[in-house]
Image (cartoon, grey):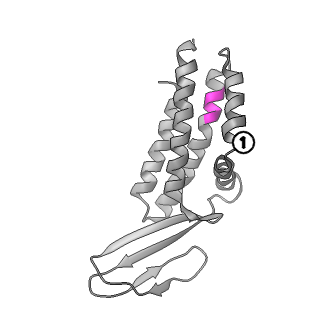
């Protein structure tokens, strides 16, 4: 397995733990920070691992021009990495937690910047579901956003390994 693939699987690991811990504030945040760091490191590792292979630099330049620079999501995830690692210690996220109970029509929304707010919904079995969004992209669920970008980078990792891994000394 290439070092690049190993770093990809590290990012995938943290994404899975985000999914498992979506209802736990700090566990979700820590796994998100780790995911974003590992995600960004994939291309750093790729460049280090394959830079000495003939044709890699040209191939990677094309990926940068045709993929990374044309899709603002990559830059956005990197900006969240900079916040989390170098500036504030965390990403800029909001969460909404909906709690429904069997005998009440009540739920509570918790947001990062406000007091808990009560809302009324039909009663059902006890369920807790937290939706996380980036402040800059409130329309996108964090887990879906990260999953989409991990899928995109998986294709790049596969292409890179296909073309350059066997040529590695």
Q: Quadrant of the C terminus?
A: top right
The relative height of residue 49 versus residue 114 in the rendered view (above or below) is: above
Seen at 37% across and 71% down, the residue is 128
- Is 16 on the left or on the right of 50, as rendered? left
Few, some or many residues within 10 Å of mark 1 (<14, 14–19, 20+) = few
The relative height of residue 131 versus residue 67 in the rendered view (above or below) is: below
Q: How many labels does the image show?
A: 1
Question: For residue 46, which quarter of the picture?
Answer: top right
The magenta region covers 43-47
- The residue indicated by pointer 1 is 69
Magenta part mainly helix, strand or loop? helix
Report the front residue among 136 and 31: 136
Seen at 45% across and 44% down, the residue is 13
- Is 139 on the left or on the right of 85, as rendered? left
In the rendered image, residue 19 lying in the magenta stretch gets the answer no
Seen at 30% across and 76% down, the residue is 126
Seen at 58% across and 19% down, the residue is 164
């Amino acid at each position: 397995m290439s070092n690049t693939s190993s770093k990809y699987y590290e990012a995938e690991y943290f994404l899975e733990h985000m999914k498992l811990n979506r209802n736990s504030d700090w566990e979700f945040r820590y796994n998100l920070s780790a995911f974003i760091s590992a995600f960004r490191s994939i291309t750093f590792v790729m460049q280090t691992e394959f830079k000495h292979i003939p044709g890699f630099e040209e191939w990677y330049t094309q990926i940068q021009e045709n993929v990374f620079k044309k899709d603002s999501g990559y830059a956005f995830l990197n900006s969240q990495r900079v916040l989390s690692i170098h500036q504030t210690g965390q990403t800029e996220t909001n969460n909404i937690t909906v709690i429904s109970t069997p005998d009440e029509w009540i739920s509570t929304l918790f947001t990062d910047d406000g007091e808990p707010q009560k809302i009324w919904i039909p009663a059902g079995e006890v369920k807790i579901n937290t939706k996380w969004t980036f402040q800059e992209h409130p329309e996108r669920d964090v887990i879906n956003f990260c999953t989409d970008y991990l899928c995109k980078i998986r294709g790049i990792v596969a292409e890179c390994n296909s073309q350059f891994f066997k040529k590695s000394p």
